[in-house]
Amino acid sequence: MTSAIDLHGAPHVARYLETDGEDGYLWRNGTTILILFTTGNKSGEERAHALIFREFQGKYLVVASKGGSDTPPAWFVNLAADPRVQVQIRGDRFDAIAHVATPEEKPAMWATMVEAWSDYDEYQKKTSRDIPVVVLERLEDQI
């Protein structure tokens, strides 16, 4: 059975990857975590981030909140420069393409993410930045 842990940042990513999510998939308040792999927009190096997510109509949603900061998280800057990413959910790592939810998509997606983590509404109140919902779409294997 997957256990809930209260890790953050690099230690969370490391433990998640070591255990294929056995430790780290379940997080605080019953929410779930994926690992997002981006390419550093300046360094070109792979970066890994543990993020709250929800499945939505066959795609995966994450929120670029940075706790309500006026600046976006580094992972968002990276995927804005290169939307080709990898995602790991438990032991399943796959290629994906990222895009920011459109104004038409966002209301339902935001509501889904607030159900997962109610603090997102508070984060939005703290900043004038429109906090984006990022949609991660699995790319099918090319044969």
Image: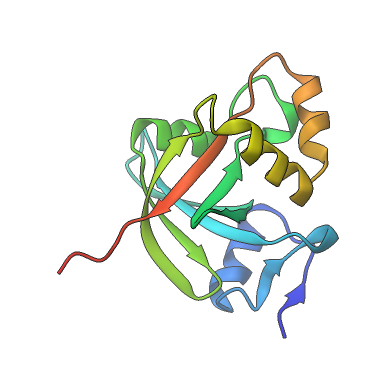
Residue 42 rendering spot, x and y as whole percentages = 36, 32
Query: Which residue reaches farthest top?
Result: 128
Quadrant placement of the N terminus: bottom right
Residue 49 rendering spot, x and y as whole percentages = 56, 51
Of 119 and 41, which appears nearest the observer? 119
The quarter of the displayed image where residue 90 is located: bottom right
Residue 17 rendering spot, x and y as whole percentages = 54, 71
Is 36 located above or below residue 91 in the figure?
above
Is 37 located above or below residue 64 in the figure?
below
Is 40 located above or below residue 16 in the figure?
above
Query: Which residue reaches farthest left?
Result: 143
Residue 136 rendering spot, x and y as whole percentages = 46, 48
Which residue is pictured at 80% across the width and 21% down the height? Answer: 126
Question: Viewed as shown, does residue 41 lie left or right of 34?
Answer: left
Which residue is pictured at 25% across the width and 66% down the height? Answer: 141
Q: How is the image coloured?
A: rainbow
Which residue is pictured at 41% across the width and 51% down the height? Answer: 137
Question: Viewed as shown, does residue 12 lie left or right of 87?
Answer: right
The quarter of the displayed image where residue 67 is located: top right
The quarter of the displayed image where residue 66 is located: top right
Looking at the rendered structure, the number of numbered marks drawn on it comes to 0
Question: Viewed as shown, does residue 53 lie left or right of 47?
Answer: right
Quadrant placement of the C terminus: bottom left
Of 99 and 50, which appears nearest the observer? 99
